[in-house]
Image (spheres, grey):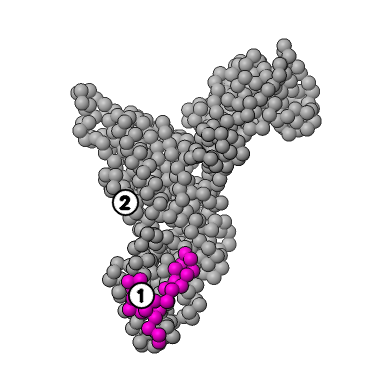
């Protein structure tokens, strides 16, 4: 490829409103252009990187025996209704009707469609199967942001395993785990595998691969002393023991006319937050439910959804709360409540001498014994873990880091095969329902994650494996025939040795050419100029380090080839 023929509209300034490093650099370096919120056109450089990311993933999927498919992006609504997810997914599904009035959806994932294909599996002898594809997904994100990190249209590698029994699923899951570890290492993404919630996907186990980045939207809790790591939606910690003392025979009412928050109650009535019971009211699958937390702890809604198995979950409205409890938020409590389900966080188990609302505006109760005074129906870990808490696995200190989710693997179980009526003939002649796994990687998000972790003040620093070009031959003094011939010779030699190379033959100043190579992030630059050739040499510059080496011109191609194919690849 000659740069004079390449469409790469680089910009001098960062685009307005680009809040992530990857967003700024992808636009500045001429990789993408926004069509509308959440939808991006990939320009030639981005297409090249995307193809290389896909090839890395494809090679690792082949290594675990997966077979590539390509399924439709447009789905009939009845399949999603059959699985139960047409309503669960809510507004995230793009819904439409065809000219005959049939309801359709743009695929946001493909569990249902792959499961329908699995109906043709006849016998346990047909299993195991691992199927995958690269396909466009559509999700109506309420707030698309950060360039390719949060979009409404993107490419996903999604794979699905089908096995007769749980041990087969365990094997498929472990193989995907290992494959993902290799994929992200090859891409140069420092992905941390963490325990995660399965959310609306369902299933028994879930691991996310998270890339630390300030641009990320997910929080990961990890131990500084051991390998424990979990998404904040799943993380747990060991709390310090609390000595409460003895509660009075019955709770005591006291007036709190100006205390509506945890902090106000602590400041005005000397009740520390960790000795308060915070009462939250949620509608869980259309039923009003009380959720009790320690005053200084925050609820993680995904933990609540996981604990209740809720298909629909929302905070109750003020009028719903007053109708049920007779008071407004700020004075709520669960003492004496028997007609509503009560779910309490484990941090409240065994607590005594606590303070909570009395379900009368401006009144609280002190001396509450949770076991005696509150009809807790179920207990669960519901609280958000914070930095500095103690690791339950080793006793070390926990840290909280902001991350980008770059991959997610699930043990789905039989949720979809049962719902969509998939069975095979088992070894004993009985019908058996296969067990499934689901495994995803967002291709464009992985590209952005690479940039988030590989950049400097000059631009992108692509790892060799996914760079749009592995080397650039920069021609100076292009009007000098011997210099042009030398640059052409090195360029052709690199291409012959299968180094993906671009020849910068543009009639620009050297500084402008160097700046473009650095902005775009090409790993190696060969500078061919009249002055160097007078001594029989060219310069080879490594983008990642900025180091420049003078090399005899006849050896330049071999030198760069060795760099490209060396241990950094």
For label 2, the residue is 58
Q: Is residue 544 magenta?
A: yes
Q: Quadrant location of residue 534?
A: bottom left
Q: For the residue carrying disc 1, how many other residues have a C-alpha within 10 Å: few (<14), some (14-19), or many (20+)?
A: many
Q: Nearer the viewer, mark 1 or mark 2?
A: 1
Q: Nearer the viewer, residue 140 or 52?
A: 52
Q: Residue at x 65, y 21 (%)?
A: 351
Find residue 556 and name its label.
1
Q: Is residue 294 magenta?
A: no
Magenta region, residue range? 534-559
Residue 290: percent from left, percent from top: 60, 24
Q: Nearer the viewer, residue 278 or 321?
A: 278
Is any part of residue 511 visible from this angle? yes
Q: How many labels sit on residues?
A: 2
- Which quadrant would the C terminus be assigned to in this image? bottom left
Q: Residue at x 35, y 38 (%)?
A: 173
Residue 280: percent from left, percent from top: 63, 28
Q: Residue at x 58, y 28 (%)?
A: 282
Find residue 26 and name its label.
none
- 430 left or right, relative to 132: left
- 436 left or right, relative to 264: left
Question: In the image, is residue 497 above or below residue 246?
Answer: below
- 212 left or right, relative to 61: right
């Amino acid at each position: 490829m000659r740069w004079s023929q390449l469409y790469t509209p680089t910009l001098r300034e960062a685009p307005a409103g680009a809040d992530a490093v990857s967003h700024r650099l992808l636009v500045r370096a001429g990789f993408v252009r926004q069509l509308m919120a959440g939808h991006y056109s990939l320009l030639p450089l981005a297409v090249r990187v995307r193809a290389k990311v896909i090839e890395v993933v494809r090679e690792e999927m082949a290594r675990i025996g997966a077979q590539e498919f390509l399924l439709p992006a447009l789905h009939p609504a009845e399949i999603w209704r059959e699985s139960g997810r047409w309503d669960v997914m809510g507004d995230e599904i793009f819904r439409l009707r065809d000219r005959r009035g049939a309801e359709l959806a743009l695929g946001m994932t493909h569990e249902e469609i792959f499961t329908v294909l699995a109906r043709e599996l006849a016998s346990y002898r047909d299993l195991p199967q691992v199927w995958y594809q690269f396909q466009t997904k559509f999700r109506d994100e309420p707030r698309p942001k950060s360039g390719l990190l949060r979009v409404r249209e993107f490419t996903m590698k999604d794979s699905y395993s089908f096995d007769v029994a749980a041990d087969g699923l365990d094997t498929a899951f472990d193989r995907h785990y290992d494959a993902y570890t290799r994929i992200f290492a090859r891409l140069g993404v420092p992905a941390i595998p963490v325990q995660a919630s399965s959310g609306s996907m369902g299933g028994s186990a879930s691991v996310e691969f998270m890339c630390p980045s300030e641009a990320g939207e997910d929080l990961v809790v990890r131990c500084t002393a051991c390998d424990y790591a979990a998404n904040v939606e799943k993380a747990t910690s060991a709390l310090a023991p609390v000595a409460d003392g003895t509660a009075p025979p019955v709770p005591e009412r006291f007036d709190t006319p100006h205390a509506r928050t945890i902090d106000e109650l602590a400041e005005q009535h000397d009740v520390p937050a960790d000795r308060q019971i915070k009462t939250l009211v949620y509608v869980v699958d259309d039923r009003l439910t009380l959720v009790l937390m320690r005053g200084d702890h925050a609820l993680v809604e995904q933990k609540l959804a996981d604990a209740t198995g809720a298909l629909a979950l929302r905070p109750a409205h003020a009028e719903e709360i007053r109708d049920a409890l007779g008071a407004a938020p700020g004075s709520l409590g669960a003492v004496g409540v028997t007609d509503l389900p009560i779910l309490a966080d484990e941090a409240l188990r065994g607590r005594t001498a606590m303070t909570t609302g009395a379900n009368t505006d401006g009144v609280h109760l002190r001396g509450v014994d949770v076991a005696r005074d509150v009809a807790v129906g179920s207990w669960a870990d519901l609280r958000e873990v914070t930095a500095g808490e103690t690791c339950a696995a080793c006793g070390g200190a926990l840290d909280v880091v902001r991350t980008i989710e770059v991959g997610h693997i699930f043990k789905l179980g039989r949720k979809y095969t049962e719902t969509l009526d998939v069975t095979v003939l088992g070894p004993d002649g009985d019908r058996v329902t296969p067990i499934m796994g689901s495994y995803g990687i967002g291709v464009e998000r992985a590209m952005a994650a690479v940039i988030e972790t590989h950049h400097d003040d000059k631009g992108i620093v692509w790892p060799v494996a996914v760079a749009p070009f592995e080397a650039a031959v920069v021609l100076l003094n292009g009007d000098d025939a011997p210099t042009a011939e030398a640059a052409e010779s090195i360029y052709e030699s690199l291409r012959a040795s299968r180094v993906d190379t671009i020849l910068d033959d543009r009639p620009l100043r050297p500084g402008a050419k160097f700046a473009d190579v650095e902005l775009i992030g090409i790993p190696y630059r060969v500078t061919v100029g009249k002055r160097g050739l007078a001594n029989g040499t060219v310069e080879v510059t490594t983008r990642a380090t900025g180091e420049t080496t003078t090399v005899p011109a006849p050896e330049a191609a071999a030198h760069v080839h060795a760099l490209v194919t060396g241990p950094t690849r």
